[in-house]
Amino acid sequence: MATFESLGLEEGLLQSVTALGFTEPTPIQEKSIPVLLQGTKDFVGLASTGTGKTAAFGLPLLQLINKQDKFPQALIVCPTRELCMQITNDIQTFKKKYAPVSVTAVYGGASITTQIRDLKKGTQIVVATPGRLIDLIERKAIQLERIQYIVLDEADEMLNMGFRDDIEFILQNTPARESTWLFSATMPSEVKQVSKRYMKDPFELTIGKANAGNVNIDHQYYVTNHNNRYETLKRIIDFNPGIYGIIFTRTKADAQAIAETIIREGYDIEALHGDLTQQQRDKVMGRFREKSLQLLIATDVAARGIDVTGITHVINYELPDDPEVYTHRSGRTGRAGRSGICLSIVTPRESYRIKQIERMVNSRFHKLDIPTGKDVCRKQFFHFIEKMLQADISHGEYEAYLPLLKEKFAHIDKEEIMQRVAALEFDRFLQYYENAVDLNKESGGTRREERGERREVKGDRRGAGRGDSGYKRLFVNLGTKDGFYKASFLQFVLDMSDLKKEVLGKIDMKEMNSYQNDQSHRRQEVQGS
């Protein structure tokens, strides 16, 4: 059985490992550390989260860097701020009994001025999320020319989150790197492409079964306040310019209202719900299958039976009340052997439901940061450049127009032409997101909202109020927005349940939902499609 002493680690690192209570290396540590300590070999390690990957690359990095040189020598890139901070803290712990190595974390949602100041003090290991790292590169606040070692941690998550262009940009701008280490839980085609393009004959290591679990669908979620739900949805759509997906809502009113709002903002989207005739439904589905529509927004009832290949994303605008419905929704993507992403937008008070659904689908969910305005603009820019470079100019008599084009652009240099093209394409995005707020900062909920939710829960437990002693509250997620008034709503409740009119009390009608006092002592919930 291997020991840390047998792996080639120096004495100070061994003392740190012992102080942490590590008695023997995990499989990924045992097999990777001796390879990584060579410092000249590209490496691909496939292992699930919780197997000790941070120590597997963190300990070799600490031993390889030159402690006298006070400039960035190693760069660790990871998908989220939470993981960025976790890796930084772990490496700080590993070096306690070893050497005074400087480690700096840079990530979105924190003061970039403070991070720039920390970098200027002189650091040797930088741990970064892709978006913030590129911000620093653009500000010339970090130099990558002398980076020797790059670690891509959770590479599959970063690519699923849409950071492929950012990762390639980073790799292209680290010409002096001696080795690249890629760690991933799975090995989808995108990860393979990056490894083939930027790594030379890498040492490949798989711990456990490759691509274990449900690798076709990646389950992700964003946490935000209820009043930020629509803006979060819009950010997600804008951050995935090549998206082809379905957005699920609880009610047809939500589906129609969101569709109308997004259409007004220039998106190719249609609603699919129970109020459509079969002819209208067939027309919408025809356009969606032909990809004339980028997005379809639907209720669960209306989406039953949809079998369209190539759907990249399923977005839960709200989590379904029944966890089983989540499986139905997520199953719209990842079909025919392709990979897909299922995203959910949840409020802080709904976060506990993610754990419930995780257990049911037997798959880990990944909490992501809501993209910032800069993240969205950068992603759109990369997408536009890629489309322009891949444009087919083999058809058409473009050469006939070249003399006129040359004459028109004779007095404009190439950089100005590129700026004008970018302005035409991105003016709308730049204006919209110029002063966009960071929705992650507001995801904890306001005190007023939290108090209101607590009062509502408390009211449900004790009854409907002082004037309705002995009643319980019946909640229905239908309201005036669905065309109800009090009389028709009362009839709806009687038709949909076995309650008697005599046990029903005061009706509290709201736009999106309704409450009715019930003296039958049986709390029920009625849902609309």
Image: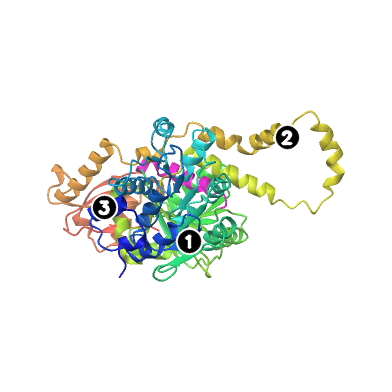
Percent x, y for residue 140?
53, 33
Q: Nearer the viewer, residue 485 or 20?
A: 20
Q: Which residue is mark 1?
A: 44
The magenta stretch is 225-242
Q: Nearer the viewer, residue 348 or 112?
A: 112
Percent x, y for residue 269?
55, 51
Are the two marked residues, 2 and 1, in contact with CB atoms closer than 8 angstroms? no
In the depicted structure, whether residue 361 falls above or below residue 136: below
Can you see residue 222?
Answer: no
Rounded to the nearest whole Å, what is the CA distance between mark 2 and mark 3? Answer: 58 Å
Q: Which residue is mark 3?
A: 15
Mark 3 crowdedness (10 Å alpha carbons): few <14, some 14-19, many ≥20: some
Q: Earlier in the sequence, mark 2 or mark 1?
A: 1
Can you see residue 67?
Answer: yes
Please give left or right for residue 294 compared with residue 88 in the image. right
Q: Which residue is mark 2?
A: 414
Are the two marked residues, 2 and 3, in contact with CB atoms closer than 8 angstroms? no
Q: Nearer the viewer, residue 144 or 436?
A: 144
Rounded to the nearest whole Å, what is the CA distance between mark 3 and mark 1? Answer: 28 Å
